[in-house]
């Protein structure tokens, strides 16, 4: 992979993406410098990911991530 033209494939903020380096799934929070910032479903620290290894999450992965977030929201004190 040369990385040419892949930056245009970077998922939009708010969507879910997969870090192809290790398979982690995260919500795209935005960009800082050359990196895409991802946050795990349900919360946690963001991590930086080079844009050439970020791919949009497939529908099944998105569904699991959303369920994780909803379950986490249900556990928060009110």
Image (cartoon, grey):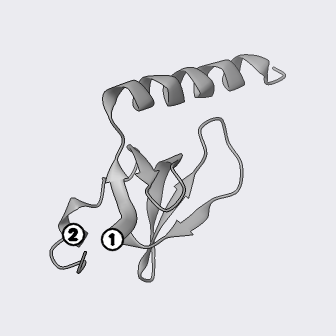
Quarter of image, res 42? top right
On the image, numbered disc 2 is attached to which residue? 6
* Residue in the image at 29% along x and 61% along y: 10
What is the x, y in percent for residue 18? 43, 49
Tell me the quadrant of the picture where the N terminus can be found. Answer: bottom left
Q: Which mark is residue 65?
A: none
> From the viewer's perspective, is residue 67 above or below residue 9?
above
Determine the secondary structure under disc 1.
Answer: helix
Determine whether, in the image, residue 52 is placed left or right of residue 8: right
Q: Residues within 10 Å of mark 2 (few under 14, many from 20)?
A: some
Disc 2 to disc 1: CB gap under 8 Å: yes
Residue nearest the viewer, comparing 23 with 29: 23
Q: CA distance from mark 2 to mark 1?
A: 6 Å
What is the x, y in percent for residue 61? 43, 31
Tell me the quadrant of the picture where the C terminus can be found. Answer: top right
What is the x, y in percent for residue 23? 51, 50
Quarter of image, res 73? top right
* Residue in the image at 63% along x and 59% along y: 46
Residue nearest the viewer, comparing 2 with 28: 2
> From the viewer's perspective, is residue 20 above or below residue 32?
above
Determine the secondary structure under disc 2.
Answer: loop
Determine whether, in the image, residue 43 is placed left or right of residue 35: right
* Residue in the image at 54% along x and 56% along y: 22
* Residue in the image at 48% along x and 56% along y: 29
Q: Residues within 10 Å of mark 1 (few under 14, many from 20)?
A: many
> From the viewer's perspective, is residue 19 above or below residue 35?
above
> From the viewer's perspective, is residue 38 above or below residue 52?
above
On the image, numbered disc 1 is attached to which residue? 52
């Amino acid at each position: 992979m040369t990385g040419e033209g892949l930056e245009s494939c970077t998922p939009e903020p708010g969507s879910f993406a997969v870090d192809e380096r290790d398979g982690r799934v995260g919500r795209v929070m935005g960009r800082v410098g050359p990196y895409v910032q991802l946050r795990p479903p349900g919360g946690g620290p963001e991590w930086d990911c080079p844009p050439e290894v970020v791919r949009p999450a497939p529908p099944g992965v998105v569904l699991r991530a959303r369920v994780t977030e909803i379950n986490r929201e249900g556990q928060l004190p009110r």
